Amino acid sequence: MKKSAIVLGLAALFSLNAIAQTVQEGVSNYYAQRYQSARAVFEKLTAANPNNLEAVYWLGQTLIDQGDVAGAKALYSRTLATNGNAPWVLAGMGHINIIEGKSAEARAQFDQAIAASKGKKGPDPLILNAIGRANVQPYTDEKRIGDLDYAIARLNEAAQAAPTNPDIFLTLGNAYRKKHIGGDAIQAYRKAGNFAPALYRAAMLWSSQRNTDAVVENLNSAIAADPRFAPAFFELYYLNLYKKDFAAASGFADKYIAVADQSVENLYLKAQTEFVQEKYPEAIATANQIISGTQNNPRPRVYRLLANSYLKTKDTTSACTNSNLFLAKASGEDLISMDYLLHARACGSGNPDLIRADIMKAVGMDSVLSRQIATLNEAIEDARVNNFKLLEGELRLMSYTLRAATADKGELISYIAVPLYLGGNYVKADSIAQVYIAAAPDSIHGYYWSALARTSIDTNMSQGLAIPMWDKVLTVAETSKERYASQGVRAATSLAVYHNNIKTDRPTALGYVTRGLAFDPANANLLSIQKALSVKQAPAKPAKTEAKPKATTTKPKSTRK
């Protein structure tokens, strides 16, 4: 009897636990990025009641954010088999179809979900919000899957029907943010009120605009709204870490770990700290520990950290591999403009097309010119400090192009052509030098860097690509021999070598040597060339021929007796 009572008591306890946990609790965990906890809540709710279709929807959303799209698809498909007209699950399945690029199928399911959810006051605003999320969440500037305009229309409709629902305004703000309409995004987040996820998203938007005060204010407000909102603690840790306030960073790291899911992923904070302290091998080891502990399925940020760490150790191959992994696994919420610039640094060696494409993606994440320039300036300084000359040149060219109306023409040589040349893109360096020549035909600098670039293209001078430019350099240099001595000597030397070796025109070559010595009469190289060219060649010896036999005469015999 007692044993039965214990069994019944346990059954009742489990039932109460299932009832005690609510969809809202799971959603709170979901937005706080406690995906393990959120999944546990939704799995308990759906196990207790498979017809709790809102819990089914959110379980699928959690699986998507954990990278298990196949699991979410299987869940929604299985549920639709017995609940074929369930609006929540239709919205979720439409989300899967958006991810898989099946936009027509997704739209049909959204229409079906809206029709099925209609009541006397119109469609259910929560279903409209789910449809909005399905179009917004997978959308990135690179992939552009989902229809942001359609999402905004449905979300505004939902907001009119439920003007106090903060989740709707969060999704609406995310939609405007991904359309790069920052002002409307901030307004939508504000309409969400004292809602931690919206305050956090506002902070991240201010972060992209480098407004640190607004970032900190919104993160603190998010924590005040939800003292267990883990992402806010993480960002405050990050801000203090990069200010090298390790004591404050450590405090926020402890607070983050206290409210986050307990996971090997929390070692990421240790790896980040090691990176900032320039302990790159240690940061790599810790990041690899996270990857191993998650069965090769960590959050994408781990690959970003590895890419940066490998770059610091000059291992561009490993950096490129991890940067590619990050971009392949990251969702739109994970990406910032610097991720594309990281990819350019890691993978762009010898590939200017890739560098340009990455720069365009980075700059395209913000539509305001001043902030685009700020992004470029930050990246230029990083490239300069790390001696990534090709990337520096491409970044400076992008900045120059954006500022075309006010940019100084002098930037074309010193800031663009020179780093492009030093980075090995001689064709691009020459083309930029030619633009400068057109703008400043009396300046020696365009001709000089064009000549250097063409010399690096035509290394044996067989094509004579650089000769017209060297002629121009020498001519301009002769107008101010003292000022342009080094350029004049280089031009005269190159011209002398070309005319002697390629054109076999010794007198012309000697003439260029003489002009070069006018800049530097003691120049050892020119004097050596002059000596070699001044030696008279010995006349060619005639070819040997067989000696003709000497003519012989025989005296006639005397007839005298």
Image (cartoon, rainbow, N blue to C red):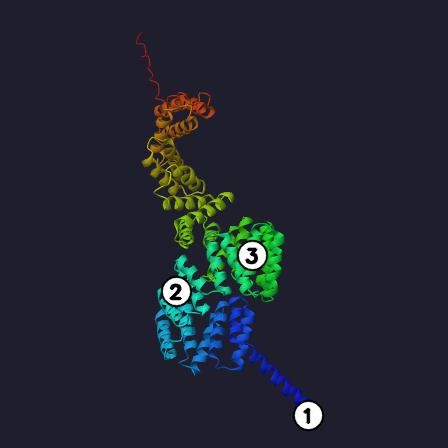
Q: Residue 145 carries which label?
A: 2
Q: Position of residue 502 (x, y in %)?
A: 36, 32
Q: How far apart are marks 2 and 3 (CA)?
A: 32 Å
Q: If you read the primary sequence from the N terminus, does the residue marked by circle 2 or circle 3 appear first?
A: 2
Amino acid on which disc 3 is placed: Leu
Q: Distance between the residues labelled 1 and 3?
A: 57 Å
Which of the pair 526/430 is nearer the observer? 430
Q: Kindly identify the residue that appears in the image at 42 percent across and 25 percent down.
A: 483
Which residue is denoted by mark 3 in the rendering? Answer: 236
Amino acid on which disc 2 is placed: Ile
Q: Quadrant of residue 440?
A: top left
Badge 1: residue crowd in 10 Å (few <14, some 14–19, many ≥20): few
Question: In the picture, which quadrant includes the C terminus?
Answer: top left
Which residue is denoted by mark 1 in the rendering? Answer: 1
Q: Position of residue 323 (x, y in %)?
A: 49, 56
Q: Kindly identify the residue that appears in the image at 54 percent across and 82 percent down.
A: 48
Q: Is residue 174 left or right of residue 38?
A: left
Q: Position of residue 536 (x, y in %)?
A: 39, 20
